[in-house]
Amino acid sequence: MKENLIIGALLSPFVAGIIGLLPNISVQWQKRVSLLGTISMMIFSSLLVIEVDKVGVLSFQAGGWEAPYGISIVADRLSALMVLVTSIIAFPALILGFESVHKDRKVAKFFPIFMFLILGISGSFLTGDVFNLFVWFEIMLISSFVLLVMGNSKKQVKGTIKYLAINVLSSTLFLVGIGVLYGIAGSVNMAHLALVLPEIEPKGLVALSAVFFFVAFGIKAAIFPVYFWLPSSYHTPSTAATTIIGALLTKVGIYTMLRFFSLMYYDQISWMQQIVFVIAAFTMISGGLGALAQTNVKKLFSFSIISQIGYMVMGVFIGTAAAFGAVIYFLVHNILVKGALFIITGIVGEHTRNFDLKKGGGIAKTYPLLAVFYLIVGLSLVGIPPLSGFWGKFGLLSAGIITEQYWIISIALAVSVLTILYFLKVWNEYFWKAPKVTKTKRPLPYKFVISGSAIVLSVILIAVFADPIINYCVQAGEDLFNKNLYIKSVLGDVEISI
Amino acid sequence: MKTLIVNTAIKFLIPLFVLYSLYLLFRGHNEPGGGFIGGLIGALPFVMYAMVYGVDEARKTFPFNWPLFKSLGLSLAISAALLGLIFKGDLFAALWADFYLPIIGKPGTPILFDIGVYFVVVGVIVELSYNMINYED
């Protein structure tokens, strides 16, 4: 019956979304229900993490159909943690939305769609079936299309069209990959595929499907040459939507990459590794340089997302248990920190009605609280010990050095300097320098304060409790590497010949 | 579109479309059909009526609360999933009655799920089309 925790975590946002979609429901009630759904999801997912940490993997089959035929829903350490982090980031983003989402957007059901986005994301983390993953992806993408375009300004429509086009392309590639996979293996169950794929001939087709999945998830994660859609669409919608989309959606791409290439395509890592490293290096560098060139703060952090994606792709393709563990910690750190950056600069931007660095300034004097928040989160991003970014980068780099991947590690280290530069740029321009136009100080709405404190608190907490969290992530990385636990939980006691 | 033939024919076609969509819905468990296709065909007559007579007239003639359909449909679908969880211990497990209804056959939770899908599709398609037809005006 422990499996019901998974169902609870999925049902909370779903039911909140359904209630919010009712016609004639007031915006006040939409807000209350969404908040309730998020909190309930947070409770369920925390319990799920605790439970999964005891037993390793929880799984169930939809409809009770046996594993390779039915749809498996699986929560291992990685999935459970990702769902928990999703609910943690959803909370402050929602509170921010309560205050900042423009009136006409609220009428158009912003909050229920937000709940469906959360549902799609957590579903993607929990499914153990490749085709089911595609369906969750669609739920997630359709909700994000709506959130991006909601408000109907010309700028938003322009950004959303790019986002939509590239995502349709990516979904098509994903679908073709599933087709190839089903054609050669006759199954779409991840655990079953993990068993049968190593023995399948011809090897070329297996490699081909791996490349299809890599490109499809790569587009979603915004890796080099296909990242251009991200900065041109992420800065347009309301801050609450940007926060959740920016913090989570690219990371779903990384999560699926991690899942596929640890569970099913582990053999493919060896030949793809150097090619992917080149892509990862370009992703890091172009993201970092792009961030330096921007003056719109939302655009700047969109490029910053891309830069950090490079680190994670690198980690996935180093391909050791330690590297997987480090990627998981880095994912958690990055979701929270990127979310926090979007929230804090979003608060500043919404409150002063200015997202332009050149016109901004003086925030440190008028709103010292926000400046302190930004400083903590920014130092976390850069990786100053003892904050969380340090542990994430340390894990990734040490995993790389052990496996002697020196050139990519040196680039990763060099790009850290770019991170410091754009962090300081925002600090100097937005918070520190004297403003050109002195604006009168208005008190911050209390919802902004709650939202900012909640996210900064969670950023601090993952640094304070770095030790248990790192242990958990290392264990999760080993589970991914060994994969027997996962396969056994889904398929029962089968002969495992790997 | 103001032609006498379409204007007259649409009134007779509406019940035909709805009946055919219901037929597709109920045969969907074992044969081609089901909630999605049934829903698309079920939405067609209402969309066509609006194309012929205009959206305002269509809303007046069929005073259904279309946006309610999607919430209703989603609730039906999720309750089909939960009934399986409560009575059989598996999410989406199928519960079957042990009697037959005329025409429909043996009722069970899969048809409940399909009816949910039907409602969502009808509600969304009709509402979408009405808004888009209005937008063109």
Image: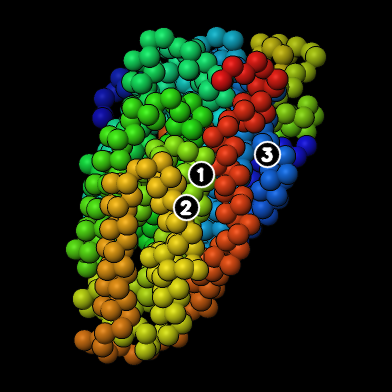
Q: Is circle 1 on the same chain as circle 3?
A: yes
Is residue B133 visible in the rendered image? The answer is no
The amino acid type of the residue labelled 3 equals Gly
Q: Mark on residue A3?
A: none
Q: Subunit of mark 2?
A: A
As measured in the structure, the alpha-carbon distance from the residue carrying label 2 to the one carrying label 3 is 22 Å
Which secondary structure, mark 1? helix
Left or right of A36 in this view: B55: left
Q: Subunit of mark 1?
A: A
Q: Which is nearer the N-term, disc 1 or disc 2?
A: 1
Is residue A494 visible in the rendered image? The answer is yes
Q: Mark on residue A322?
A: 1
Judge whether B60 appears above or below A446 on screen. above
Mark 3 residue crowding within 10 angstroms, few (<14) / some (14–19) / many (20+): some
Q: Which is nearer the N-term, disc 2 or disc 3?
A: 3
Which secondary structure, mark 2? helix
What residue is drawn where x is 65% and y is 22%?
A491
Residue toward you, A361 or A193: A193
As measured in the structure, the alpha-carbon distance from the residue carrying label 1 to the one carrying label 3 is 18 Å
Q: Mark on residue A56?
A: 3
Residue toward you, A179 or B96: A179
Residue under circle 2? Answer: A395
Which secondary structure, mark 3? loop
